[in-house]
Image: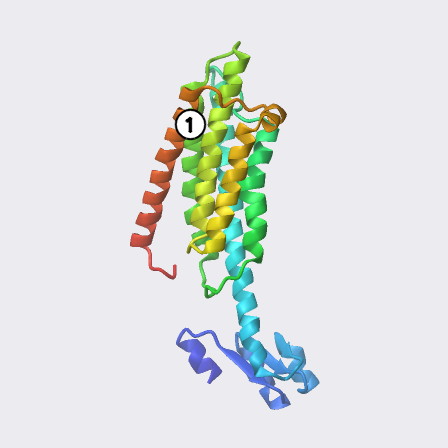
């Protein structure tokens, strides 16, 4: 029976407590033994029900789904950051290597810290512990890359565009800080949107999570203490509007890419 179900593409679980169940437990994708079963049965099983109650199995399945589903969400957030960080470094560094005027990197280490706090670190902690009832499906790497790769490319392109449009050139320290702040506004806005995409389907606590992270991010730019601490200057209205416009364009592109991906691929891919 186990082999017949597997030949039809099913994932098969086998439960048992006696020595005669050992071979079937080994052949099954998941072997579940009773706690009061024979030592041989318990030794080959992946799961042992210590309380001898089948009612425990739904909780085991739910915990597995939560872990796998939440790892996928968190991985998408971290990989998105990896993609746009690498692309921004290349965009700034490569022109200088081939003879063009080199641009300074748009962000200070403390700017990266802000981004990590409110778009990856704190949200990832909450999402990793949240309930998740999605079924475990093959294709983990592909699904994560289809979110992270396009989002990372769009964020890098939008940030670098905002930086180029507002960069004043060498010599004007105040304007350089304002340009860096503009690029950071674009980055955080798009990264928060990716957080909202990863957190879908929407629920009240997910909306609250994104809202809290957004308010905290805005506070970094408007409070005098954090402006001084993180060297932020959003005082140039034109630059700020430029950054927000680049972010809005990036959001449209991300949503178009997601829509095309859903149309071209089956829902379980």
- Given residues 34 and 31, the one toward you in this image is 34
Residue shown at the point (54%, 81%) measured from the top left: 14
Q: Judging from the image, what secondary structure is the residue with disc 1 in?
A: helix
Which residue is drawn at the image coordinates 56% and 77% (left, top)?
57
Residue 239 location, quadrant: top left
Can residue 40 be seen at all in this image of the molecule?
yes
Q: Nearer the viewer, residue 48 or 209?
A: 209
In x, y percent, where is residue 198?
45, 50
Left or right: 245 in relation to 2: left
Q: Residue at x 53, y 28 (%)?
A: 222
Dot 1 crowding, Cα within 10 Å, few <14, some 14–19, many 20+: many
Q: Tell me, yes or no, if residue 148 can be seen here.
A: no
Image location of residue 17, percent across then percent down: 62, 87
- For residue 253, which quarter of the picture? top left
Query: Whole-percent x and y of residue 221?
Result: 53, 29
Residue 7 as seen in the image, left or right of residue 59:
left
Q: Is residue 97 above or below residue 126?
A: above
State whether residue 67 is above or below residue 156.
below
Residue found at x 53% / y 71%: 61
Quarter of the picture containing the C terminus is bottom left
Disc 1: which residue: 243
Image: 91 above or below 173: below
| Image position of 123 (left or right of 38) | left
Q: From what the image shows, is residue 8 above or below residue 38?
A: above
Location of residue 260 in the rendering, given as x and y in whole percent from the top left corner: 30, 48
Display coloring: rainbow
Q: Residue furthest right?
A: 39
């Amino acid at each position: 029976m186990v082999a017949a179900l597997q030949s039809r593409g099913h994932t098969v679980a086998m439960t048992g407590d006696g020595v005669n169940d050992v071979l079937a437990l080994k052949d099954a994708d998941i072997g579940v033994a009773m706690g009061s079963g024979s030592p041989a049965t318990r030794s080959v099983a992946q799961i042992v029900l210590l309380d001898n109650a089948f009612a425990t199995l739904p909780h085991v399945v739910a915990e597995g789904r939560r872990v796998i589903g939440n790892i996928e969400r968190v991985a998408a957030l971290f990989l998105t950051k990896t993609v746009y960080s690498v692309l921004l470094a290349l965009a700034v560094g490569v022109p200088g290597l081939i003879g063009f005027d080199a641009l300074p990197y748009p962000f200070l280490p403390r700017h990266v810290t802000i981004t990590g706090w409110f778009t990856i670190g704190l949200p990832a902690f909450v999402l990793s512990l949240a309930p998740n009832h999605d079924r475990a499906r093959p294709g983990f790497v592909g699904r994560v890359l289809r979110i992270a790769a396009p989002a990372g490319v769009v964020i890098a392109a939008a940030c670098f565009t905002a930086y180029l449009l507002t960069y004043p050139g060498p010599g004007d320290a105040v304007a350089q800080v304002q340009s860096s702040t503009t690029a950071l506004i674009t980055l955080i806005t798009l990264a928060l949107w990716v957080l909202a995409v990863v957190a879908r389907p929407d629920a009240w606590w997910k909306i609250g999570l994104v809202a809290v992270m957004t308010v905290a991010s805005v506070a970094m730019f408007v409070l005098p203490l954090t402006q001084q601490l993180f060297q932020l200057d959003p005082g140039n209205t034109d630059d700020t509007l430029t950054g927000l416009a680049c972010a809005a364009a990036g959001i449209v592109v991300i949503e178009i890419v997601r829509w095309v991906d859903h149309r071209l691929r089956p829902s379980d891919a």
